Amino acid sequence: MNALLTLLLLIPFLLPVALANVAERERSVRVFLMVYLGILAGLLLIVGVFSVLAGVGLGLAGFNALPTAPNQPNPEEAAQMLAALRNVNWGVAAVVCLIPGVLALLALVPSVRRAVARVLPIHPDSVVHTTALSMTAVAFGLNLFQLVVLSPILLTEAVSNSPSLTQGATYFDILIFPLLVLTIAAVLGVGLYTRRNQTEVFERLGLSLPTPRQIVTAVFVTVGLLGLSIFTNWAWQQFDPTGFQQVGSLSEALMGNFTGLAGALAIGLSAAIGEELFFRGAYQPRMGVLLATLLFTTFHVQYSFSPATLLVFVIGLVLAFLRNKTSTTVCIMVHFLYNFTLVLLASAL
């Protein structure tokens, strides 16, 4: 059910990606798409305004309880939720929605795109690139909102062993996202059957058979990233054992169902294929290394803002440079080997 709900929630964000390539030829579709992108940006601004109101409301002295549903009359859980909501920095939540919302609207202005084109390899008159710019701002806003708002709530639930987290993610969840949704976004974004045929899409996404030297490179890079991960976790545990344990509890609650060979293969393949096709294959060649890496990092907000987040950023940066030097195929290999090994190691411990 979580996977299907995720898919339904993501359809409004896949729609403009699909329409953008058609809108390059059809003016009527272009007008609809611009309006649609404006609406998405407006919704993000509304979330920012509600964040301000939520912060004010939760800060009121008389706001001491949350209403409970008739089938959930647990005052202890309601009190925990209220405490988690009060731990949220609603001012920051408002900022991370309002600024990207404004940027998403500005991306629709031709003069702004011409200025951006001096920095990024985009065509300011391209509807596809306009959509990519606007949706990038929206994605940043939504991901950072999750980081600011949902992470404190999830951490609170993980520490208190809330029943809502005991189920964790399922194999169907990771089939939908990241594998299915991000793969669809990647191939639609580069114009499969609208602007490019299959061969051209493979070339645009950077998919090619790796050479023996590239395979060796992938193995060495993977070993280096695994060493960096082990060192980061060790240092984090030494200097912030409480934070390490909290985030570890959350990660185990969310992904604890994936153990052994089956779990390693599932997480390794789904994340490697979906994320690399989208971030390094489709997105990076137009939006650049830094934006691709930052966006990749914000898609891993389940770790909250912690050393794990910085580790994800460094890994994304390494994969980004690897994409420029080799191919997306090599990035998929490294990503798979890295995730596969970590899950097997976690299962063995």
Image: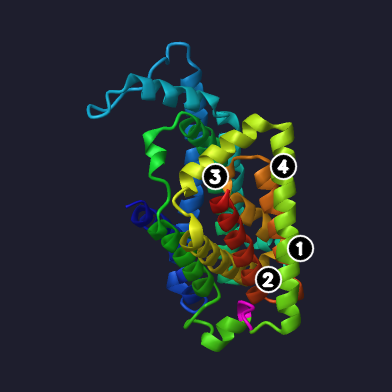
- Residue matched to label 2: 285
Q: Is the magenta stretch mostly helix, strand or loop?
A: loop
In the displayed structure image, the side of residue 46 where residue 73 appears, left or right: left
- Tell me the tag on residue 302: 3
How dense is the environment of label 1, judged by Cα within 10 Å: few (below 14), some, or many (20 and up)?
few
The label number, if any, that marks residue 200 in the structure image: none
Secondary structure beneath disc 1? loop
Frontmost of labels 3 and 1 is 3
The mark nearer the N terminus, 4 or 3, is 4
Image-based side of 237 in relation to 201, left or right: right
Dot placed on the residue nearer the N-terminal end, 2 or 1: 1
Q: Which residue lies furthest to the left in this view?
A: 70
Q: Write down the quadrant of residue 161 in the picture.
A: top left
Q: Residue 119 carries which label?
A: 1
Q: Which of marks 1 and 4 is nearer the N terminus?
A: 1
For marks 4 and 3, give the one nearer the viewer.
4
Give whichever of 330, 65 is nearer the camera: 330
For badge 3, the amino acid type reads: Gln
Type of amino acid under label 4: Trp
CB under 8 Å between callouts 3 and 2? Answer: no
Q: How far apart are marks 3 and 1 (CA)?
A: 31 Å
Q: What element carries label 4?
A: helix
Q: Where is residue 288 in the image (x, y as percent from the top left)?
A: 71, 64
- Labels 2 and 1 touching (C-beta < 8 A): no
Q: Nearer the viewer, mark 2 or mark 1?
A: 2
Which residue range is magenta in the image? 204-208
Mark 2 vs mark 4: which is more N-terminal?
Answer: 4
- The residue drawn where x is 58% and y is 62% is 340
Residue lying at 47% horizontally and 48% vertically, measured from the top left: 256
